[in-house]
Amino acid sequence: MTTSITAPALLPADPAYAAAVAPFVTTVTPRPDMVVEARSPADVVAAVRWAGEEGRAVTVQATGHQLVTDLAGSVLISTRHLDDVRVDPATRTAVVGGGAQWKQVIAAAVPHGLAPVGGSSSGVGAAGFCLGGGHGPLSRALGTGADNVRRIRIVTADGIERDVDATREPDLFDALCGGKAGFGVVTEIEVALHPITRLYGGGIFFPGEASPQVLHTWREWIATLPEDASTSVALLRLPPDPSLPPPLQGAFVAHLRFAHLGTAEEGAALLAPMRAVATPIADMVDEMPFAAIDAVHADPTEPMPVWDDSATLATLPAEAVDALLTVAGPGVETPLIIAELRQLGGAIARRPDRAHDAVAGRDAGFSLYALAPMFPPVAAIAPAATKAVVDAMRPWTVGGLPNFQGLGSRGRLGPLWDDATAAFLTRVREEYDPAGMFRTVGLMA
């Protein structure tokens, strides 16, 4: 007897279908054969069991930040309604539903004087972030999102809901903490929280014409930073958006981001060499409550069609900066919205005490990310523009980060891990999903 799906199951003809499958990145329109809107872990169990009995492929989506295929031929299990968050101040942990976003975790943690290790945007799904390793403004000080996971609840291809951690099914736990996708449907994660209530951070916008000085100074300045400081720099071609401050509307700028857990005085002293590079258009770095951490990167908050690509770099010599400026700097005609470098290292580079470490990019010094809009008429040249950035930096490339893989890489996760780790992840996937139910899962976010 076939298991019955207990949650709303929508077909393409259903009026609610489009809203149920809507992603954050709208370049690709999801077209699964069916979407199951799980309201509880039991709904996920029923959907996975039904799919197994029917021989159907399963895909998973929470926020849709990394949609790289149209999901055709699959049953999509949407976890966006599994968004409960429970904070335990005594253990400094949060139990987070598989569809919850970081902003929900932050809202629950801040009243207790606690903070999670999340991403540069609080609109990203917490579970997907941690499954892919997870690099954010606090990661140089406190490790990746995966390093801060204590327990994961997952429904595997056999329809069994499992609680896994360092002692219960540790291989599956290790694979989930960085292996990103293809192991099942995560319904809940438990993450560590930290006694952080504020930081000294924000962004400084320099004129785009000053980007050569900004980038070359930045590459030397970062060597002076302690682990409790993190930074990135982005070449931004901003739209004429009236929601932006007038000096930034339609401007080409170099956006320096900074987040420091020390005092404001210490942070200002560290930042002084960068503030002296050029006269900024806007300097928004200041003491801020942790709840305002989104202001550090000021990432977009509205869904839009984009094309993106990424890599990790071993080093950033002066030649690499010049190569980036050649394809994205002043005077370059390009549809790019962003070409970004983030400093890695610090606690990110330290491997946890686990039998298997599935977090990619530990040994990289920097991450590289490029994004262009897919609006006409530039949509035709957007893929080439992002590829040009990645190609220009190829002499220093050592891999990539799962959470930054976009349409430019089409979700090719395998090359991101060394041979031993890739073999470990394959073994665990085959053990828990021998029939390949999640073969079309792509990227979860």
Image (tube, helix red, strand yellow):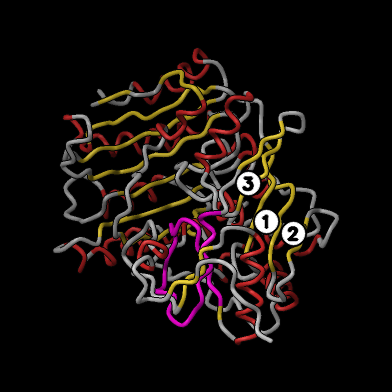
**Cα distance in 3D space between marks 2 and 1:** 6 Å
Q: CA distance from mark 3 to mark 2?
A: 16 Å
Residue at x 54% of width, y 22% of height: 198
Residue on which the image places disc 2: 173
Q: Quickly name the residue at label 1.
A: 177
- Between circles 3 and 2, the one closer to the viewer is 3
- Which residue is at the front of the view, 302 or 218? 302
Q: Nearer the viewer, mark 3 or mark 1?
A: 3
Residue at (76, 62) in percent of width and height: 162
Q: Quadrant of residue 11?
A: bottom left
Q: Are marks 2 and 1 in contact (CB under 8 Å)?
A: yes
Q: Is 87 within the magenta?
A: no
Chain part drawn in magenta: 58-81
Mark 3 vs mark 2: which is more N-terminal? 3
The CA distance from mark 3 to mark 1 is 15 Å
Majority secondary structure in the magenta region: loop
Residue 361 x %, y %: 58, 55
Secondary element at tag 1:
helix
Q: Name the residue type under label 1.
A: Cys
Residue 241 higher or lower than 363, as above or below: above
- What is the crowding at mark 2: few (fewer than 14 residues within 10 Å), some, or many (at least 20)? many
- State yes or no: residue 80 in magenta: yes
Viewed as shown, does residue 20 lie left or right of 3? left
Q: Which residue is mark 3?
A: 96
Residue 103 % position (x, y): 50, 39
| Local crowd size for mark 3, using a 10 Å CA cut-off: few (<14), some (14–19), many (≥20) | many
